[in-house]
Image (spheres, rainbow, N blue to C red):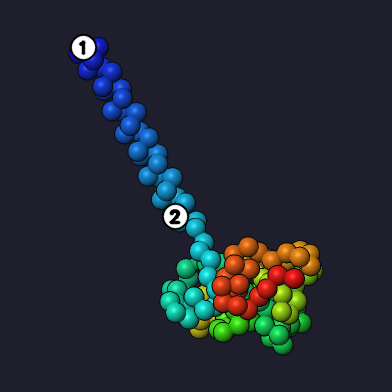
Amino acid sequence: MTRKQKRLAIIAGAIGFLGAATGLTLYALGEQTSYFYMPGDLAEKPVAAGQRIRLGGLVEKGSIERSDDTHVRFAVTDGNDTVTVRYNGILPDLFREEQGVVTEGVFDESQTFVADTVLAKHDENYMPREVADSLKEKGVWQEN
């Protein structure tokens, strides 16, 4: 092999290695991605049961139902559509009705969203950016 052939072989091997590493990385990230949806988005295009997503919106007034233990049921709305959420765990201290929330989890077979994470706003001036942008587009939420 000449020097030129050795150099081309090394470059081809490096490009092949980088391509394989990039492909594996994108595959791994694709498996862990959780897409953000508003209730209206889900009404237009439902997701399959078991697909992991983030659901954002406002906690609907009068929808919080607590049981004796840590089980909670509430509704997330964008002003037009509503999704029922079931959660088992301790809710954030500032979780309350008519406040911004982002939940992460999956839909079960009965189309109830089973959340394993609930994120609420942390002060009076904050709402998750994705939720605020989506609610502003629909004319439901305005900044103070």
Residue 97 x %, y %: 73, 80
- Foreground residue, 126 or 74? 126
Secondary element at tag 1: loop
Identity of the residue drawn at 63% across and 62% down: 129
- Foreground residue, 55 or 1? 55
Report the quarter where the N terminus lies.
top left
Identity of the residue drawn at 25% across and 12% down: 3
- Foreground residue, 37 or 20? 37
Identify residue for label 1: 2
In the displayed image of the protein, which residue is found farthest to the top? 2
Q: Is residue 17 above or below residue 38?
A: above
Q: Is residue 141 above or below residue 80?
A: above
Report the quarter where the C terminus lies.
bottom right
- Foreground residue, 32 or 140? 140
Residue 70 numbered tag: none
Say which label, 1 or 2, has the lower sequence index. Answer: 1
Identify residue for label 2: 30
* Residue 120 can be seen, yes or no: no
Residue 114 lies in what quarter of the image?
bottom right
In the displayed image of the protein, which residue is found farthest to the left? 1
The amino acid pointed to by label 1 is: Thr
